[in-house]
Image (tube, rainbow, N blue to C red):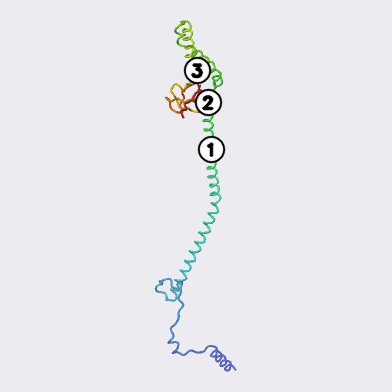
Amino acid sequence: MIRQSLIRSSRTALRAKPVQPSWSSSLQRPQQQISPSNLPFLSRAQLPAWQSSSRWYSSEAATEGKKEEMQGNGVKEGEQKQDQEDPVKKELEAKNKEIVDLKDKYLRSVADFRNLQERTRREVQAAKDFALQRFAKDLVDSVDNLDRALSTVSEDKLAENADLNSLHEGVRMTETVLMQTLKKHGLERFDPSEKGEKFDPNIHDATFQAPQPDKEEGTVFHTQQKGFMLNGRVIRAAKVGVVKNS
């Protein structure tokens, strides 16, 4: 019985594991599992070509993956940093706009204030210059009366009557002093016929026209009433006669 059981077990073992011929085992090249961890002293050039190339490619892929991951992290960090800086940048832009607006308002206010100063100065000066305008208008009639009184006395009567001559000289002196005083305050009298001035409608009032062969067309040859100016402003135009030859 024992012998039969041994024979059965040996046959079962033979069936489970076939025996390779010796010539096949001698011809086949033994394959060894070599890994860098098992052979730390081997360099990349000493490793088998398939393992060296696979490790090279795997390391390149890992490096590229790390680079892409770092780039992605950098982009995310940049976006986060930009998001964090955006409120500050917006606030800075708003402040800059506010500064520009305030500067513009300041310059406009300065310009308005200077214009107001200049306008006020002109108004004050005009008030000083023409404060006597109403008084001067009332006074020119008295000056006209003195001028008429002097012009009505002929030279013959002055020569015949010494008293009348003295009175005439006194009136003339009064008129001269009065005109000098009025001139100090800006009131001046003008006679356009003395120099034969051209007719100017701004300061002359033409009452008649007459031909004058020896005078130029459009000039003033006669003054009926002398004009007055107060600091360059006409308060009464001169009434004149104008030459018209045609």
Sequence order check, earlier mark of 2 and 3: 2
Taking the image as drawn, is residue 141 in sight?
yes
Task: Identify the amino acid type marked 2.
Answer: Ala
Q: Is residue 44 left or right of residue 109?
A: left
Number of other residues with Cα within 10 Å of mark 1, as a class: few under 14, some 14 to 19, many 20 or more: few
Number of other residues with Cα within 10 Å of mark 3, as a class: few under 14, some 14 to 19, many 20 or more: some
Q: Find residue 34 and name its label.
A: none
Determine whether the residue tagged by mark 2 lies in a helix, strand or loop.
helix
Q: In 3D space, how far apart are the residues under numbered discs 2 and 3 (Cα atoms)?
A: 18 Å
Q: Which residue is mark 1?
A: 108
Relative to 84, residue 107 above or below: above
Determine whether the residue tagged by mark 3 lies in a helix, strand or loop.
helix
Relative to 51, residue 29 above or below: below
Pinpoint residue 212: horizontal percent, then vertical percent.
45, 25
Front-most of 43 and 207?
207
Sequence order check, earlier mark of 1 and 2: 1
Pinpoint residue 79: horizontal percent, then vertical percent.
53, 56
Q: Quadrant of the N terminus?
A: bottom right
Determine whether the residue tagged by mark 1 lies in a helix, strand or loop.
helix
Task: Identify the amino acid type marked 1.
Answer: Arg
Q: In 3D space, how far apart are the residues under numbered discs 1 and 3 (Cα atoms)?
A: 44 Å
Q: Nearer the viewer, mark 2 or mark 3?
A: 3
Q: Nearer the viewer, mark 1 or mark 2?
A: 2
Relative to 79, residue 29 above or below: below
Q: Find residue 126 and name its label.
A: 2
Pinpoint residue 183: horizontal percent, then vertical percent.
48, 19
Q: Find residue 182 and name its label.
A: 3
Number of other residues with Cα within 10 Å of mark 2, as a class: few under 14, some 14 to 19, many 20 or more: few
Q: Are marks 2 and 3 in contact (CB under 8 Å)?
A: no
Pinpoint residue 103: horizontal percent, then vertical percent.
52, 40
